[in-house]
């Protein structure tokens, strides 16, 4: 069977189109073969024409409700990039087939309830076949996972003794805009059985290792700064992914002998928070209350009906373009070591593009890292399983994103005595 290197499923959707466009224009395009898959042959052919895809791109219409069809298709690829949402409704058979047949996988989900089901049902299978499966490889949740990782890595380089982190806080500056697919996913939550959402407020919901209990806040201040804000719109999924990275690193450090070498980990007292950057704590408080009221309103049938009828429709979204570097996403993180005489670092991360463009970049670079840089991945990644971006890819993904020019960052030591200190 002749395989393509990269197969994009849900290619004709809003995010899928951005991913295909980025792949086709990738500087390394000549090094990999590409396939696109979706339900409609005519839409796939139109996409190929609209994006002027090369004649070598394979087109695969398939029936996602037919598991045999899904299995036959994924076996034609080395790595799948999946954009078919709501993921909890449609994409479980894709992950199942990938885990069974050693086809690596990344996706753009932001659905923690679905990721929890994947961990329960397919983590062991994926480890058995050494298949790397990385949900949440887009804007949810690569930027958050990467920013916390960069601060942790910087502190690890400063200390000779084994690293033990304390509090890690990220403030996010990002523009507003939802695709129709994202909105449809939000609205679909009301269809889930209550049992599937039980415990969802727990930031350690996706890891077997439990950390310190979180502190609920409506207003935030970044430690040792005058940066303020309110609840992060995507904080629920991002915090869970960062904590799963922490949990996976902790579990490996406690269970694996790496020949006497210390295993990179965050330490048992690590705790992560993030917030949306706003002009002041008052703005943060008002924003948080408004956000919570808005999320509550979305549970009401009349509101859901209105949004389904008049909101952004699936397959469409905000106009975002590659190369528009004037619009950026900024992540500002402060992380401290745990215990007496702590060290503190501040990491400033800039993604040069808007959220859905960055989703395309991070998902593609994650997929390419798996198939072309497999030998350089962390041991945790090479072992396979239901993983996170940084636990699976680590420095390899950082280097790829830097080379893409869509990521820049700098990390420096903080000296709290000379800074505005907050608790």
Image (cartoon, grey):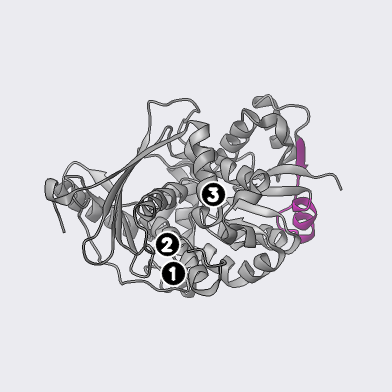
Q: Is residue 258 left or right of residue 190?
A: right
Q: Do the residues labelled 2 and 1 touch (CB within 8 Å)?
A: yes
The local secondary structure at tag 1 comes to loop
- What residue occupies the far right of the structure in this picture? 1
At x 57% / y 61%, what residue is drawn?
380
- Measuring from the top left, give residue 57's x and y in whole percent: 75, 33
Dot in front, 3 or 2: 2
- Measuring from the top left, give residue 404's x and y in whole percent: 52, 33
Among numbered discs 3 and 2, the one appearing first in the sequence: 3
Q: Quadrant of residue 45?
A: top right
Magenta-colored stretch includes residue 73 = yes
Query: Disc 3 versus disc 2: distance between alpha carbons?
Result: 15 Å
Residue 108 - label: 3
Q: Is residue 133 left or right of residue 346?
A: right
The local secondary structure at tag 3 comes to loop
Q: Is residue 59 left or right of residue 292?
A: right
Query: Disc 2 versus disc 1: distance between alpha carbons?
Result: 7 Å
Residue 46 is at least partly visible in this image: no
For mark 1, does the 10 Å Cα neighbourhood hold few (<14), some (14 to 19), or many (20 or more) residues?
A: many
- Magenta residues span 58-75
Q: Are marks 3 and 1 in contact (CB under 8 Å)?
A: no
Query: Disc 3 versus disc 1: distance between alpha carbons?
Result: 19 Å
């Amino acid at each position: 069977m002749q395989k393509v290197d990269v197969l994009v499923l849900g290619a004709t959707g809003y995010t899928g189109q951005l991913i295909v466009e980025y792949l086709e224009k990738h500087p390394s395009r000549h090094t990999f073969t590409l396939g696109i898959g979706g339900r409609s042959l005519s839409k796939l052919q139109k996409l190929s024409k609209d994006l002027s895809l090369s004649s070598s791109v394979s087109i695969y219409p398939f029936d996602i409700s037919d598991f045999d069809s899904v299995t036959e298709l994924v076996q034609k690829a080395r790595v799948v990039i999946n954009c078919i949402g709501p993921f909890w409704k449609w994409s479980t058979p894709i992950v199942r087939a990938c885990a069974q047949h050693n086809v690596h996988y990344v996706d753009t989900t932001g659905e923690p309830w679905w990721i929890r089901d994947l961990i329960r049902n397919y983590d062991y299978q994926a480890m058995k076949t050494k298949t790397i499966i990385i949900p949440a490889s887009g804007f949810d949740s690569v930027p958050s996972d990467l920013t916390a990782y960069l601060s942790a890595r910087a502190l690890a380089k400063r200390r000779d003794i084994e690293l033990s982190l304390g509090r890690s806080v990220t403030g996010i500056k990002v523009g507003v805009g939802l695709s129709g697919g994202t909105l449809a996913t939000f609205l679909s939550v009301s269809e889930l059985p209550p049992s599937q959402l039980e415990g969802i407020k727990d930031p350690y919901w996706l890891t077997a290792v439990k950390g310190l209990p979180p502190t609920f806040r409506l207003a935030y201040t970044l430690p040792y700064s005058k940066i303020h804000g309110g609840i992060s719109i995507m904080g629920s999924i991002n915090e869970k992914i960062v904590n799963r990275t922490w949990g996976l690193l902790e579990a490996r450090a406690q269970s694996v002998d790496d020949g006497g070498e210390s295993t990179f980990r965050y330490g048992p007292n690590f705790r992560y928070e993030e917030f949306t950057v706003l002009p002041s704590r008052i703005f943060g408080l008002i924003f948080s209350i408004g956000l919570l009221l808005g999320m509550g309103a979305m549970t009401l049938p009349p509101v859901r009906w209105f949004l389904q009828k008049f909101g952004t429709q699936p397959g469409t979204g905000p106009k975002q373009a590659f190369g528009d570097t004037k619009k950026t996403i900024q992540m500002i993180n402060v992380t401290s070591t745990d215990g007496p005489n702590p060290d503190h670092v501040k990491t400033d991360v800039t993604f040069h593009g808007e959220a859905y463009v960055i989703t395309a970049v991070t998902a593609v670079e994650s997929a390419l890292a798996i198939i072309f840089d497999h030998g350089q991945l962390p041991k945790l990644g090479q072992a396979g399983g239901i993983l996170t971006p940084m636990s699976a890819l680590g420095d390899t993904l950082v280097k790829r994103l830097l080379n893409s020019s869509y990521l820049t960052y700098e990390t420096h030591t903080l000296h709290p005595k000379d800074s505005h200190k907050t608790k």
